[in-house]
Amino acid sequence: MENPYPALAALDVFALLSTANEGVSQAILQAAYLEKPLIATSTGGLREVCLPGRTGIRVEPFSPDQVASAALSLQRDPALRARMGQRAKQLVEEQFVFEKTLDQMEKVYQGL
Protein backbone atom coordinates (compact mmCIF):
# COMPACT_ATOMS: atom_id res chain seq x y z
CA MET A 1 0.00 0.00 0.00
CA GLU A 2 1.55 3.26 -1.11
CA ASN A 3 -0.01 5.42 1.62
CA PRO A 4 -1.32 3.48 4.62
CA TYR A 5 -2.25 6.54 6.69
CA PRO A 6 -5.85 7.04 5.49
CA ALA A 7 -6.62 3.39 6.28
CA LEU A 8 -4.90 3.57 9.67
CA ALA A 9 -6.65 6.84 10.52
CA ALA A 10 -10.04 5.23 9.89
CA LEU A 11 -9.46 2.51 12.49
CA ASP A 12 -10.76 2.62 16.06
CA VAL A 13 -8.21 0.03 17.24
CA PHE A 14 -5.06 -1.44 15.69
CA ALA A 15 -4.26 -5.13 16.15
CA LEU A 16 -0.99 -6.82 15.27
CA LEU A 17 -1.01 -10.52 16.07
CA SER A 18 2.46 -11.85 15.38
CA THR A 19 3.57 -15.31 16.41
CA ALA A 20 7.27 -14.71 15.82
CA ASN A 21 9.85 -12.88 17.88
CA GLU A 22 10.65 -9.95 15.64
CA GLY A 23 11.76 -6.38 16.15
CA VAL A 24 9.48 -3.40 16.58
CA SER A 25 7.05 -3.22 13.69
CA GLN A 26 6.79 0.03 11.74
CA ALA A 27 3.07 -0.65 11.33
CA ILE A 28 2.43 -0.65 15.08
CA LEU A 29 4.51 2.51 15.53
CA GLN A 30 2.55 4.25 12.78
CA ALA A 31 -0.78 3.22 14.32
CA ALA A 32 0.37 4.31 17.78
CA TYR A 33 1.47 7.67 16.39
CA LEU A 34 -2.03 8.10 14.97
CA GLU A 35 -3.40 7.59 18.52
CA LYS A 36 -4.81 4.12 17.95
CA PRO A 37 -5.09 1.88 21.00
CA LEU A 38 -3.25 -1.37 20.39
CA ILE A 39 -4.00 -5.05 20.61
CA ALA A 40 -0.83 -7.06 20.16
CA THR A 41 0.63 -10.43 20.94
CA SER A 42 3.19 -10.66 23.70
CA THR A 43 6.05 -11.42 21.32
CA GLY A 44 9.26 -9.67 20.34
CA GLY A 45 9.31 -5.93 19.88
CA LEU A 46 5.55 -5.64 20.18
CA ARG A 47 6.02 -5.79 23.95
CA GLU A 48 7.94 -2.51 23.76
CA VAL A 49 4.99 -0.65 22.25
CA CYS A 50 1.86 -2.41 23.48
CA LEU A 51 2.02 -1.77 27.22
CA PRO A 52 -0.88 -3.47 29.02
CA GLY A 53 -3.35 -1.00 30.47
CA ARG A 54 -1.35 1.93 29.13
CA THR A 55 -1.14 1.85 25.32
CA GLY A 56 -3.16 -1.28 24.65
CA ILE A 57 -4.00 -4.83 25.52
CA ARG A 58 -1.61 -7.74 25.09
CA VAL A 59 -2.81 -11.19 24.12
CA GLU A 60 -1.09 -14.52 23.81
CA PRO A 61 -0.35 -15.89 20.32
CA PHE A 62 -3.00 -18.23 18.94
CA SER A 63 -5.62 -16.97 21.41
CA PRO A 64 -8.66 -15.81 19.42
CA ASP A 65 -10.80 -15.61 22.57
CA GLN A 66 -8.35 -13.14 24.10
CA VAL A 67 -8.32 -11.07 20.90
CA ALA A 68 -12.13 -10.97 20.82
CA SER A 69 -12.31 -10.01 24.49
CA ALA A 70 -9.74 -7.24 24.03
CA ALA A 71 -11.53 -5.86 20.97
CA LEU A 72 -14.88 -5.88 22.76
CA SER A 73 -13.42 -4.16 25.82
CA LEU A 74 -12.04 -1.35 23.68
CA GLN A 75 -15.16 -1.12 21.53
CA ARG A 76 -17.35 -0.70 24.61
CA ASP A 77 -15.22 2.03 26.21
CA PRO A 78 -14.50 5.04 23.97
CA ALA A 79 -12.79 6.89 26.84
CA LEU A 80 -10.38 3.99 27.36
CA ARG A 81 -9.65 3.90 23.61
CA ALA A 82 -8.89 7.62 23.66
CA ARG A 83 -6.60 7.40 26.72
CA MET A 84 -4.69 4.43 25.35
CA GLY A 85 -4.38 6.09 21.95
CA GLN A 86 -3.00 9.29 23.47
CA ARG A 87 -0.51 7.32 25.55
CA ALA A 88 0.52 5.29 22.51
CA LYS A 89 1.35 8.46 20.58
CA GLN A 90 3.23 9.85 23.57
CA LEU A 91 5.28 6.64 23.81
CA VAL A 92 6.25 6.84 20.13
CA GLU A 93 7.19 10.51 20.44
CA GLU A 94 9.29 9.86 23.55
CA GLN A 95 11.01 6.62 22.58
CA PHE A 96 10.81 5.90 18.88
CA VAL A 97 11.11 9.18 16.98
CA PHE A 98 14.16 9.05 14.70
CA GLU A 99 15.69 12.28 16.03
CA LYS A 100 15.41 10.97 19.59
CA THR A 101 17.14 7.76 18.56
CA LEU A 102 19.93 9.76 16.92
CA ASP A 103 20.40 11.80 20.09
CA GLN A 104 20.66 8.61 22.16
CA MET A 105 23.16 7.07 19.72
CA GLU A 106 25.25 10.26 19.77
CA LYS A 107 25.45 10.10 23.59
CA VAL A 108 26.61 6.49 23.39
CA TYR A 109 29.31 7.35 20.87
CA GLN A 110 30.46 10.37 22.89
CA GLY A 111 30.87 8.09 25.89
CA LEU A 112 33.31 5.80 24.04
Image (cartoon, rainbow, N blue to C red):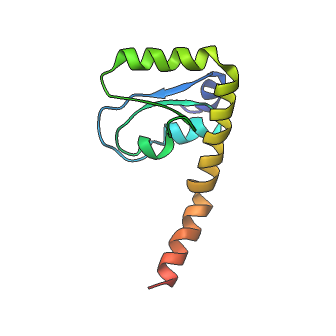
Residue 93 in picture, x, y percent from top left = 64, 51
- Residue at 40% from the left image edge and 45% from the top image edge: 45
Q: Does residue 50 sit above or below 59 in this rendering? A: below
Q: Quadrant of the C terminus?
A: bottom left
x, y (%) of residue 52? 50, 36
In terms of image quadrants, where is residue 29?
Answer: top right
Q: Position of residue 4 (x, y in %)?
A: 58, 31
Along the horizontal axis of the image, is 77 left or right of 73?
right
- Residue 82 percent across, percent down from the top left: 69, 29
Q: Depth check: 86 or 22 in front?
A: 86
Q: Is residue 14 visible?
A: yes
**Residue at horizontal 51 percent and vertical 71 percent from the top:** 105
Q: Quadrant of residue 75?
A: top right
Report the residue at 59% width, 70% height from top. Answer: 103
Q: Residue at x 58, y 35 (%)?
A: 31
Q: Nearer the viewer, residue 55 or 8?
A: 55
Q: Is residue 24 above or below residue 31?
A: below
Numbered disc total: 0
Q: Tell whether 70 sits left or right of 32.
A: left
| Foreground of the two, 44 or 1 | 44
Regarding residue 35, the answer to whether it shows in the image is: no
